[in-house]
Amino acid sequence: MHELTYAREVYKIVHKYAKYCKANRVIAIYLVAGTGTGIEQASFQFYWEKLAKGTPFEGSHIEIDYINDDTTLLVDRMRIEDKGGS
Amino acid sequence: MKQFVINQPILDELTKKGIAIRQVFDAHKIFSVNIMASPGAGKTSVILRTIESFKNIYNIAVIEGDVIELDVERVRNLGVPVVLAHTGGSCHLDSIMMEQALKQLNLEDIDIIIVENVGNLICPANFYLGTHRNIVIASVPEGDDKPCKYPGMFKGADIVLLNKCDYLDHEAFELEYFEKGIRQLQENIRILPLSAKTGEGFDKWIAWLTNSYDRYIKSFTIDTS
Ligand SMILES: Nc1nc2c(ncn2[C@@H]2O[C@H](COP(=O)(O)OP(=O)(O)O)[C@@H](O)[C@H]2O)c(=O)[nH]1
Ligand SMILES: [Mg+2]
């Protein structure tokens, strides 16, 4: 249910890193989430697509790895296409 | 294609922003409360009656977490500064929305800020807004089992107000069971039955708020030399 808020935060985080590693395009973003956080893959992807429109993140895929706790929520890694091509 | 490891917690930034907001409050000696409850429990009604009691004593401002101006209008009619923290349909307020709302208030002239969170007994508990106290309102028609069902919310409360106590005689509401549900989470917490309709119990709530405000202001003058 907090997906919009979380999507905005994830955007800020990956934006920073994408700039740093000179990503041309971001292909996938991997999150780790506790099941107790209530964060839902489909809902997150929905908000993510809205935020990502017209940015290097457009078309990127969100993958959530669930673990069994209440609080964990982190951006684990991302898959990118860098400036030199893949 | 490349993998890039990030490994960064997501809520950190929001919490940091909440802490920054708390520092802004403290710089202005503004005492702030975050009012949380389910939709219709009586958040706005309690706020309105509280303003009536305090209007000539403290300068109060209100932040309404909502999508439309309905409750904003109700508060504005009492002549106190009020802004809408636009939630965009989200199930809670977060520190980003708070920051935007605070920009619209003149902080120089405020003693107390009351925040009406989004009507929801789950989500708002997870987001730190920088406020000094969490006020959780339950109401009699919702039933006496809410503390058992939503421990996350009641666990974080600094005081629980049981609103609509004018219904206590009509509803099958066991006050003891309700209180037990809360005491299992927090043994010594204050639980106050009141009614925003009749005003019953408001003297105790106003006294609690006044006392909390006084203690807050005093904390700035403690001699540390
Ligand atoms: N009987 C009774 N009704 C109340 C009381 N407090 C609020 N209400 C009514 O409950 C409804 C919802 O109140 P409101 O303050 O808008 O709730 P909110 O959604 O939590 O802000 C309104 O119709 C109020 O008049 C109360 O103490 N007793
Ligand atoms: Mg309301």
Image (tube, coloured by chain):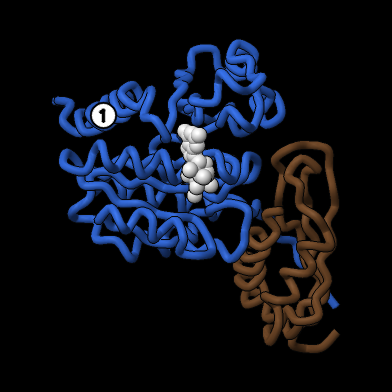
Chain colours: A brown, B blue
Rendered location of residue B115, percent (x, y): 42, 47
Up-down relation of residue B1 to residue A30 (above or below): below
Q: What residue type is labelled 1?
A: Thr
Viewer-nearest residue: A16 or B182: B182
The residue at the point 83 percent across, 71 percent down is A61
Is residue B106 among the parts visible in the rendering? yes
For this orientation, the residue located farthest to the front is B170
Residue B105 in which image quadrant: bottom left
The residue at the point 62 percent across, 39 percent down is B121
Up-down relation of residue B3 to residue A5 (above or below): below
Q: Which residue is label 1 attached to? A: B210
Up-down relation of residue B131 to residue A81 (above or below): above
The residue at the point 58 percent across, 15 percent down is B175
Viewer-nearest residue: B158 or A63: B158
Which quadrant does the N terminus of chain B fall into?
bottom right
The residue at the point 31 percent across, 30 percent down is B209
Residue B220 is left or right of residue B208, and the answer is left
